[in-house]
Image (tube, rainbow, N blue to C red):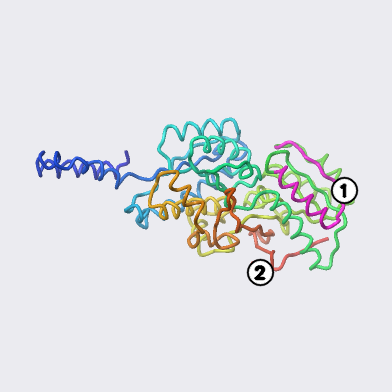
Amino acid sequence: MSENVRFQVEGLNRRTLVAGSVSLLAMPSVFSSALAATSPVNVGVIVSLSGANAQFGINSRNGIELVADEINAAGGIKELGGVKINLIVADSTSTPTTAGTVAQRLITQNDVVAILGAFASSLTIAISDVAERQDVPLLTMSFADQITGRGYKNIFQVVAKASVIGRAQFDYTAAIAQAAGAKIDKIAIMYEDTAYGTAQAGGLRAGAKAANIEIVMDDAYPLGIADATPLVNKLRTSGAQAVFPVSYLNDSLLIIRTMRQQRITIPAIGGAAGYVIPDFEKGLGEFAENVLSIAPANYDLAPELTERFRKRFGYFMVHEALEHAVCLDVLVQAIGKAKSAKAQDVVAALRSTKFTGGWTKAMPGDAVEFDQTGLNKLSVPLMVQWRNKELVSVWPKDIAKSAARWQS
């Protein structure tokens, strides 16, 4: 029991003692009603706080905590009488088997209205299996098509799926090159062999095929490579005019550093994940400048919101923090719409509502609305580019904050 709840219950006990035992017997619901009115709404947060994906998990937790603290400071969930949000945070580690076990334990041991998490798609898929069985909604910003592609009723994905992001990764690149007067005839794809990497590579292939562009290199690799030299050597001899790597942080650093050290200067267009966090620029320095990447959202679309994150945590609001912030905002809006913190009431609200205002304004599309699969049908990817240690939105033109730089 929280200190806030304990204080109010103790106050009730003192009042009933003064009023006398008869009044308590005559009104048996007084105690339970007061407790219900002050009990917080528990929200489970399952993210990687250890292992290879720990930084992404920490970023995600930071975004969620920012929104929860702001809602609580503003008076809590007003539709439920001002109850506060209580985050129950658990470490999924970076292993899918552990993530599923953690989800099972968290849900069965706590009365949670929903789960948020877990950034890495392989972890989210494991968590989603548990959430579906337990009839608890899961809101996620993970990409993999499989997340909302299995007919589950309790899973909600606030970003575009990976195959759509991969297709945009190619299509936007082709448009940027064309606008710069450049022509692409051959491309290379390299991707980690996870659910995220595999699905996004599929979107890249579809884009290249539709544009009749030759894929001269199409290589999967295991997550966490120790040496990118074999991949980069193959890239060197492929004749590709642009390369599309899809990877998390450590692999992204290895790939770009090895390319630039070998003086391979063709444009590299990252697949979000490791390419759009401060550690990418910190790890590469000048090699990061002008690297392009697809992204589901970017902090420069709504600085009036995202600068609060920078002020509190000391770095720009990375996309996983932003989109997990959106997840919590949408969840709280759904609770308000349902006027209930019961999981299935909230699921019904999530499925029937277009969510606007608040943190949804930071998403391309300015709102969140889920289709019958649980996918946000309003989400569109955008292209960002590293400029002087910041990420700048450069495509599509209607939301770009600066023109893209193409270096061939």
Mark 1 to mark 2: distance in Å?
Answer: 32 Å
Q: In which quarter of the image is residue 212?
A: bottom right
Q: In which quarter of the image is residue 221?
A: top right
Residue 125 x, y percent position in the rendering: 60, 38
Q: Would you call the spot at circle 1 few (<14 residues within 10 Å), some (14-19), or many (20 or more)?
A: some
Q: Which of 239 and 365 is in front in this view?
A: 365
Identify the image quadrant of the N terminus: top left
Magenta stretch: give its range: 197-223
Residue 167 x, y percent position in the rendering: 74, 54
| Circle 1 SS class | strand
> What kind of residue is marked 1?
Val
The residue at which mark 2 appears reads as 398
Residue 135 x, y percent position in the rendering: 48, 39
The residue at which mark 1 appears reads as 216
Which residue is located at x 49 percent, y 51 percent?
350
Residue 143 x, y percent position in the rendering: 64, 47
Q: Is residue 199 magenta?
A: yes
| Circle 2 SS class | loop
**395 on left or right of 220:** left
